[in-house]
Image (cartoon, rainbow, N blue to C red):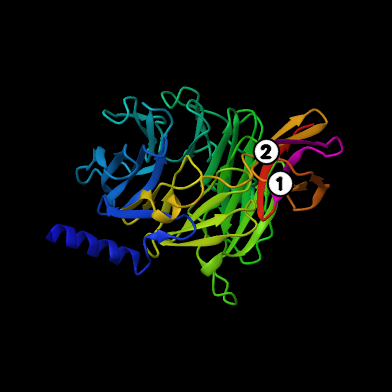
Amino acid sequence: MKQKYLGWLFLLTCLSGFPLKVEGQQKEWRIQKIVNGGIVCIACLDEQRCVVGGQEVMYDDTYIMKTVDGGKTWKKVYADTGVYPKRALQISNLAWISPDVIIASADSSYIIRSIDGGKTWGKTRVYDGFAYAKPMYFCDSLYGVLFEAKSVPNEEFNRPMVTSDGGATWKSIPGPKEPIEWNQTLISRGACIAPMKFFGFGGRGDSIMISRTKDYGKTWDQKINPFVLPNGLQGYGKFFFLDSLNGWFSLPEAFDKKLQGYPMLIARTNDGGENWTVVFQDTLPMKLFGFQSMIFTDLLHGIGTTEGRICRTTDAGASWSVDSFLLHEGSTTYIAMRKQEPSIIASGVGLIAYVNKVSHAEQELPISGDIGELVVKTMGEYLEVEFTSERGEAAHVWCDDVQGRRVIAERTMEGGVGKRIIRFDSGGLPSGTYFITVEQGGERRTEGVQITR
């Protein structure tokens, strides 16, 4: 009984007065402390299987912990305590790329890898010179990139390493040639959007540079200061790509005294990084810090985490709201998910939040609305829109571009129940991302579609 009481007391303390039930999600969260501290990364294979990694003590007690039941129970599957003065390897990134293969990048150019789901681990040093391996990104179960900073005379400072066999072997590819004023500037973040296609981000003072290669480093194109940063630069830029064309970039700016907050810049691309459009540049609700992680589940819906909170967008990043749920005020927060809703959230202070069960309020909600699943197909010079309707009244359908401009005028479909299909002439639309909206009564559904010419 005493243990149960202490557990509830700890939970209430962590929530700082916020209820477990999240009104926007209708979920019930449970919070537990699985390690003394130092969670620096999380990776999930699905909504049930995740790993977290970090250090309980600085330069010591490195660990990887694993759950297979959606966060309810955790088991330490890797430990490196180090022996003074030799310190433990510091884990930076995790990737769970297949049921059997889990990979961690660590300092001193080490890759820590398991091929049996975390039962046993092997360590490989992928570079023999003085270097440290940090940002690591996989675009599928085989292809990934490791951005590694090297301090070797007469060698490029940023020399990416790539794998095509799930991290078993790595090889160097040519890195971007920085302008002389950017000499020895590290790539601090990046992305792998498809085999051979990588992005890197670097910051220097109040300037930023995005580097991109589409041919395994043979050529790089670079964009220096592609966005206006009136408040300077603070933190690190982060990428998230939904596919090889559609991606987002987030960057926190310096503290703004007038706003008494930290402005946030979010840009998106629908052509694989050829062009970027700023969709949000303001302080986040409640003047929170910039995102520590950002994930989009489709072209419209995304989730970002910051300082123990969850932020949401339903319009491709143009506006954001904040859930009432608070994991731990002021803590670095990481999220990984495979469905529309997050199921496991990790905090830098060693806390884990997981969805316990669907609340009574959600169970009472109807399984679906009157408009069924919306499917948009490209049919040559036409767009075919298909959905099902449970109501007999008329439906209204239209198409907007990423800037919200109406590019195909609204059309009204006569009333009817069951499957409904309508075609639009899209021959005049250039390549890009577009959004089809169906409205019937008070309900509205939107689906994105990519047009390639």
**Residue 318 numbered mark, or none:** none
**Residue 438 numbered mark, or none:** 1
Q: To which quarter of the image does residue 68 belong?
A: top left
The numbered mark, 1 or 2, whose residue comes first in the sequence reads 2
> Is residue 249 toward the left or the right of residue 412 in the image?
left
Residue 21 visible in this rendered orientation of the protein = yes
Secondary structure beneath label 2: strand
Q: Which residues are magenta?
A: 417-440
Give the amino acid type for the residue marked by disc 1 in the picture.
Answer: Val
Check residue 423 for magenta coloring: yes
Q: To which quarter of the image does residue 251 belong?
A: bottom right
Alpha-carbon span between mark 1 and mark 2: 9 Å
x and y percent of residue 433 in the render? Answer: 72, 42
Question: Mark 2 Cα within 10 Å, few/some/many (few <14, many 20+)?
Answer: some
Q: To which quarter of the image does residue 82 belong?
A: top left
x and y percent of residue 408 in the render? Answer: 82, 45
Rendered position, 17 above or below 99? below
> Is residue 340 toward the left or the right of residue 47 in the image?
right
Rendered position, 118 above or below 224? above
Q: Which residue is mark 2?
A: 387
**Quadrant of the snapshot with the N terminus:** bottom left
Q: Residue at x 62, y 59 (%)?
A: 319
x and y percent of residue 395 in the render? Answer: 74, 47
